[in-house]
Amino acid sequence: MKKTPIYKTILVCLLLIPYYLFLPVSQISASSAGQDIKSTIDNYVENYLKEQRIPGASIAIVHKNAIFYSKSWGVTGESEEKVTAETPFVTGSISKSLTGLAIMRLVDAGIIQLDDPVQKYMPWFTLKDKQAASQITIKHLLTQTSGISTYSGLSISDKESNDLNAIKENVESLSNVKLTAAPGEKHQYSNANFSILGALIEEVTKQPFSEYMEEQVFSPLGMKNAAANSSKAYEKGYLSGYQSWLGHPVKSAVTYDNGGTPYGYITASASDMVQYIKLLSQHEHNTFLSKNAMNLYISPFVQTSKYRYYGLGVRISYPESKEEMIWHSGSNPDARSEVFYIPETDWGGVILTNKSHILEEKSLLYLKQGIIDILNGKEPVNAPKYTPTFQIIMITILCLLFVTFIYLLKKVKTKKLKKRGVSGIFGFTLLILGIISIPLISYITGTPWHTIRFFAPDIAFLTIIMVTLLTLNGLLSLYISFKRRQKRQLL
């Protein structure tokens, strides 16, 4: 039998090395890199949820129109069910982006035009300035340039209404609202703008807002768990979240608001929002909207800060650059959310959490940026640990007021009224502070009191105690001053 020369055997082995060694190694390396990124995101998110004391969350990341990462943590608020990728969360102002899509469907169909005045379709719509109301266009509403203030929008928000006509009723209640700028003059972020758009959709389509969203947005995009009214939301598995008290989660005392769906109460799961991100990823090649309509939707119409713009219901950062990001945040009394898409790298993601507080809102922006940093191979930014400094200051003041109350009460009971001591001016000052505290806080923050109660319940509670103690101390001081004056007169 003829033997094969050893050098031929060695040559064959060398020729096979690239196939059996080099190609598999490159594939294994890519897979390993992906696993490293996912593992890093896991650790980063879990540490964040623990530090921020967030009971439940769901995150999904999309790359090149495919799900790269999807994971859920914790439980829901009501029955403490386990959170999954299919669990609906209330999405806050991300609802504006979805309402914007609904409007663009009508524009694409030629039913309405962006530059049409609102009164063309809603003759009953009016404001305190009738002439100005007639000049507000659909585009003004979408870009938040109608002239309606943030405060006016908050005044009709979070009403916990179960009425199916609540959207129209909210818009009708704007009839006495005064504009703070001429239509088109400047950007003022206001929930009222999207409430009006919700009413416009109902007026034009002759359908409830929730039905139109189901038929024209949720179903075509494959958002199976999404809903735009309370009954549908609960039917599809929505459960309320948690309000934050001194940083600790407490089951929400706020209920779903049917009147708020166009601007902030649409519910959707992480898997639903993946479909929205995929639409942004395929914005030039989709069947949902024409190329022109989609490009209009994500165009940076109004500059809101140095690097930030507002489109037709979406935010755009760093447009016309490699750092461009299409995104929106969402905040409700018991939930906080983020959605983003980066055209340059084709990465997109959604973050849904079920705890909220007005002073903790910025933390989720850090989480979003940290995840983006990891995806870009950078060291992730860490969110600052929340410390309820403001509440601690309030508690300290309350302790001082309580000690003062005990001191004054003791003086009244023992009837030891010295010639000099607590003055009537001191008592009158405390009484006035008690009366004006809540209106003053509302004025300084530019926020209605009911919004503060919902988005900062601990601060609202401490404020009420403070008002009570200021009032009691004021009345006791006035009483002591009056009794002292009486005693002097008798002498």
Image: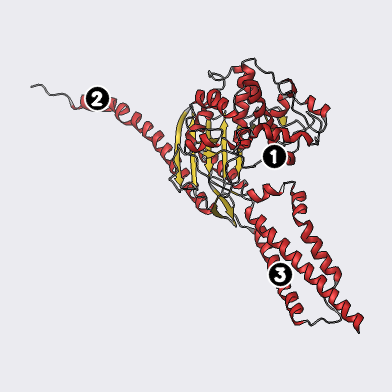
Q: Residues within 10 Å of mark 3 (few under 14, many from 20)?
A: few
| Residue located beneath label 2 in the image | 12
| Residue located beneath label 3 in the image | 400
Residue 138 % position (x, y): 71, 24
Answer yes or no: do the residues labelled 2 and 1 have beta carbons within 8 Å?
no
Q: On screen, 289 above or below 423?
A: above
Residue 83 % position (x, y): 45, 43
Which element type, helix, strand or loop, lies under badge 1? loop
435 vs 156, left or right, is: right
429 vs 222, left or right, is: right
Between 299 and 26, the residue placed more toward the observer is 299
Amino acid found under the numbered disc labelled 3: Leu
Quarter of the picture holding the N terminus: top left
Q: Residues within 10 Å of mark 1 (few under 14, many from 20)?
A: many
Q: Nearer the viewer, mark 1 or mark 3?
A: 1
Q: Residue furthest top?
A: 110
Choose the circle earlier in sequence order: 1 or 3: 1
Q: Is residue 312 something one can see in this rendering?
A: no
Amino acid found under the numbered disc labelled 1: Ile
296 vs 345, left or right, is: right
Residue 121 found in image quarter: top right
Residue 353 % position (x, y): 53, 44
Q: What residue lies at 82% left-to-right and 28% top-to-bottom? A: 130
Amino acid found under the numbered disc labelled 2: Val
| Residue located beneath label 1 in the image | 156
Choose the circle earlier in sequence order: 3 or 2: 2
